[in-house]
Amino acid sequence: MTDHDAAAFPVDFPFRGARDYVHSGSICNFWRGHAPQADGFELVLKHWMAHRLVFTPLGEGQVPAGSGHVAVTDSGRRRLYEITEDTRHPVTKREVYDEDAVPKVVDVAMRSCEVAPMAGFTFFDRVISGNKALINEILDPGVKLIAAKLTCTGFPADDARITLKLKGNVGHRVFKTAILVDGEPNGEVVYYGQ
């Protein structure tokens, strides 16, 4: 982590592909580069965001009230950052992104998805793409899927073997998936349907 973690700092993320909101994968990828030695990571999002994001470190006992939060654990110390939008700065850039290109195999009977490594796609890109495929193929909910929470132990390598297992769902509104890296539990993803 850097010295500016004691104060709020802005980050301008581009839109990815056809999305008109900041992609959860962009936020995860940023934090992977920002805190590469972290041994724990959590992203919670409350809604789509289409402006500059501001990460504000919170003190002990403070509760985030913004658009979501990031928690990074490093050597047992947990740092919490509230995410807010600076609406004076809408997103103006877009980058090419096609998550459907990520190779994945869904096993409906096992309620699982194997996501293969692919150049140009990070660990987080692959988890998010695979989870959408898993939910859509098994449940066909007919709703837009929004990443609400993603947790992982450390930051696995981009070429790690990823298996996603659908643990449960509440109708077509909430979907919970376990992340396994090289066959071992590593975290979870929670999506909600809109």
Image (cartoon, helix red, strand yellow):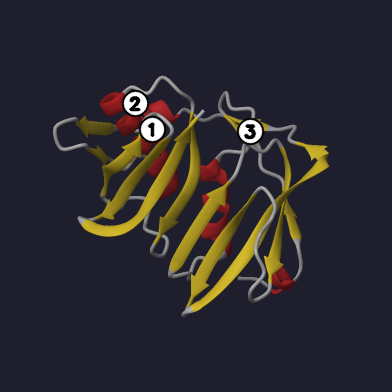
Judge left or right: residue 97 versus residue 21.
Answer: left
Q: Please say whether residue 122 is visible from this viewpoint.
A: no
Amino acid at pointer 3: Tyr
* Mark 1 vs mark 3, CA separation in Å: 17 Å
Helix, strand or loop under label 1: helix
Q: Nearer the viewer, residue 109 or 74?
A: 109
- Against 179, residue 2 (above or below) is below
**Residue 28, how many percent across, how many down?**
52, 51
Q: Which residue is mark 1?
A: 132
**Residue 96, how many percent across, how many down?**
56, 29
Judge left or right: residue 41 versus residue 182.
Answer: right
The furthest residue to the left: 109
Q: Which residue is mark 3?
A: 21
The numbered mark, 1 or 3, whose residue comes first in the sequence reads 3
Q: Nearer the viewer, residue 21 or 178?
A: 178
Amino acid at pointer 2: Asn
Q: Nearer the viewer, residue 161 or 133?
A: 133
Residue at figure coordinates x 54%, y 73% from the top left: 78
In contact (CB < 8 Å): disc 2 and disc 1:
yes
Task: Find residue 80 and report its image quarter.
Answer: bottom right
The numbered mark, 3 or 2, whose residue comes first in the sequence reads 3
Helix, strand or loop under label 3: loop
The furthest residue to the top: 142
Q: Which residue is mark 2?
A: 136
For label 1, the crowd category at 10 Å Cα-Cα, with few meaning under 14, some 14 to 19 and many 20 or more, is some
Residue at figure coordinates x 48%, y 71% from the top left: 37
Q: How many numbered marks have been drawn onto this rendered protein structure?
A: 3
* Mark 2 vs mark 1, CA separation in Å: 6 Å
- Against 109, residue 45 (above or below) is below
Helix, strand or loop under label 2: helix
For label 2, the crowd category at 10 Å Cα-Cα, with few meaning under 14, some 14 to 19 and many 20 or more, is some
